[in-house]
Image: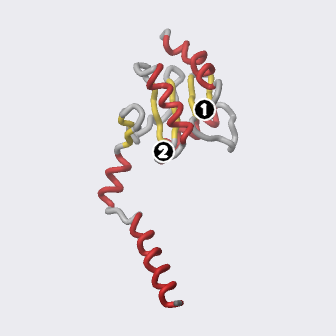
Amino acid sequence: MKYFLFSFLGLISLSLVGCDDQSSSSKNERNTQIVDQASTKQFSPIAPSRLNNDQIFLFYSDGCPHCHEAEKYLSEKYADLPIVRVNIGYEEGFELFKQCAQKFNLGRMIGTPLFCMGENYIMGWGAGFDKKFDSYVQDFIHQ
């Protein structure tokens, strides 16, 4: 019985390890092209080197459900609005994310989604955040 149990656990362990065993070319392909499921927009992993007050920046993380909710709202209501989408999973994106946090003195308690919109920011996404975004975005619509 012990032999059967150890064999079974060994097979499960091997199958779990195999789930993440992808070739480096497929990993690189996945990392160089990020596609948002809600809008089918392709996002570039290359981030600008600095924040500009005349642009809207959306900092997001692939696994963040609130980021996907925010992106869904943007694609439904502001599909034509130019927004710089920055994946913080890349070094360049994370560096720009830190710049935004420093600009607004957010300290170390920062998360995604994070919008940098000129002199305003929005961190997180939930009930009422859409109205705050609608208010802040007016300066960018009338440019």
> Within 10 Å of the Cα at label 1, are there few (<14), some (14-19), or many (20+) other Cα atoms?
many
The quadrant where residue 37 appears:
top left
Question: Dot 1 corresponds to which residue?
Answer: 125
| Earlier sequence position, callout 2 versus callout 1 | 2
User: For the residue labelled by badge 2, is the local secondary structure a helix, a strand or a loop?
Assistant: loop
Q: How is the image coloured?
A: secondary structure
Amino acid type, mark 2: Asp
The correct choice, above or below, for 86 with respect to 24 in the image is above
- The one nearer the camera, 4 or 139, is 4
- The one nearer the camera, 70 or 100, is 70
Expressed as whole percent of the image width and height from the top left, the position of residue 108 reads 68, 44
The correct choice, above or below, for 22 with respect to 105 in the image is below
Expressed as whole percent of the image width and height from the top left, the position of residue 33 reads 35, 43
* Residue at image coords 46%, 20%: 78
Expressed as whole percent of the image width and height from the top left, the position of residue 5 reads 51, 84
Question: Dot 2 corresponds to which residue?
Answer: 62
* Residue at image coords 42%, 22%: 79
The quadrant where residue 15 appears:
bottom left
* Residue at image coords 64%, 36%: 102
Please identify the residue farthest to the top as the structure is shown. Answer: 142
The quadrant where residue 23 appears:
bottom left
Expressed as whole percent of the image width and height from the top left, the position of residue 140 reads 51, 15
Q: Which mark is residue 58?
A: none
**In the image: residue 81, left or right of residue 100:** left
> Within 10 Å of the Cα at label 2, are there few (<14), some (14-19), or many (20+) other Cα atoms?
some
